Amino acid sequence: MKSPIILGIESSCDDTSAAVIQGSTILSNVIASQKVHQKYGGVVPELASRAHQQNIVPVIQTAISEAKIRQKDLDAIAYTIGPGLLGSLLVGSSFAKSLAIALDVPLIEVNHMQAHIFAHFIKDANDEAPEFPFLCLTVSGGHTQVVLLKSYTDLEVIGETRDDAAGEAFDKIGKIMGLKYPAGPEIDRLAKEGNPNAFKFTKPKVDGYDYSFSGLKTGVMNFLNQQQQKNPNFIQENLNDLCASVQHTITDMCLEKLYLAAEDLGIKSLALAGGVSANSELRHKLNLKTEEGYKVFIPKFEYTTDNAAMIAIVGKIKYENEQFGELTSKSQARFKL
Ligand code: KG4
Ligand code: ZN
């Protein structure tokens, strides 16, 4: 039997993306990132939906032509139903439903957070796909979760943030330091020339496998305000060391809970997912865990930040299990795993 060809559509935040998958092989993965938000220091929902409307048709057309298929070759349409910004989600969902009706093919609803994790099952995402059971640290601009996966359908969030997400911490602290949105990649770049132990920031104590990042943000802000009063150029003069110290603290906080869960549950396979998993220090530190007998799974960069290839791979797995969606389903701004 020929492997199904599935179109994935992602529009949950500020990236409009479309990808075509055949089996587990990605044939195309096109992403239009929205620059319009940079001057506001964060995503402006109203502007995001408008940009999705402008981008969605050309992005999908390009994904289909780059995949060297015809529209009528598509066996199903998979799209992000949530979580995300409602206006943004509605653009992707309306388009996906219309295309599914026009082509008379099934529609598949995809949870964005599940998709970040399932990016690991894309054929060229890593050397080998993780085997169940494994623990995944999913760190993005909107979420920070430790997820226990026992099978494709048995996923349990065992820890999550009580306030800001790890990516949000990078972006908000970066904003305080005068960096452009999203500050995460910029902090990563500047940290390479800095000393991670130059400044010590207090890590909040949180029970179990849960996280809290808002206290860190306030701590850094208060520290910078005090220093700037003494020396108005403090941030510029110490930017590399500040970035390295912040990054060191956030990455340690992320990993401490993952390691605690791994020890408690006796799980030896650890995976990373979501936009913040593009962070070089986080990747490096987790990789060191292999020396302690852990198996570590880190996806290729292009499958870490928001992309439609990850939506398409969930589409493929759900297609095989005949888990199809409804034309009347509503997009869900909040949507649990
Ligand atoms: O998964 P994602 O693309 O979108 C959401 O679903 O939120 O994640 C975006 C987040 C942003 O907060 C961005 O600053 C962060 O991922 N990010 C990084 C890096 N690359 C992206 N954070 C730290 N270091 C990076 N290299
Ligand atoms: Zn995401």
Image (spheres, rainbow, N blue to C red):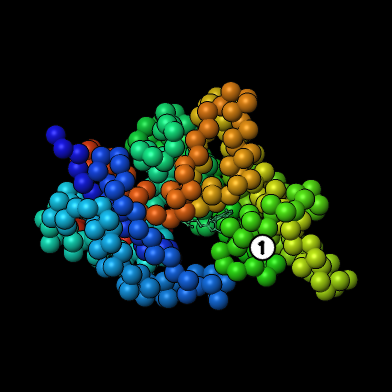
Left or right side of 239 for 168: left
Count the marks. Answer: 1
**Mark 1 is on which residue type?**
Ile
The one of 223 and 63 positioned closer to us in this rendering: 63
- Describe residue 246's horizontal placement relative to residue 158 as left or right: right
- Asked whether the viewer can see residue 254, the reply is no
Classify mark 1: helix, strand or loop: helix
Pick the front one: 107 or 57: 57
* Ligand 1 is within 8 Å of the C-beta of the residue at disc 1: no
Q: Which residue is mark 1?
A: 173
Is 71 or 231 nearer to us in this picture? 71
When asked about the image quadrant of residue 123, the answer is: top left
- Estimate the x, y position of residue 325 in percent, counting from the top left: 22, 51
Residue drawn at the location 60% of the way across and 47% of the way down: 280
Query: Is 276 placed above or below 53 here?
Result: above
Above or below: residue 4 compared with residue 191:
above
Instruction: Judge from the rendering whether residue 119 lies leftward or rightward of residue 230; answer left or right.
Output: left
Whether residue 220 can be seen here: yes
Q: Residue at x 62, y 40 (%)?
A: 284
Residue 6 location, x and y as percent? 23, 49
Up-down: is 316 above or below 163?
above
- Residue 47 lies, in percent from the top left, at 42, 76
Residue at position x 70%, y 67% in the image: 177
Q: x, y percentage for residue 252?
A: 67, 43
Bin the neighbour count of mark 1 within 10 Å (Cα to Cα): few under 14, some 14-19, many 20 and up.
many
Q: Residue furthest right?
A: 230
**Above or below, 176 relative to 327:** below
The quadrant of the picture occupied by the N terminus is: top left
Residue at x 63% of width, y 45% of height = 281
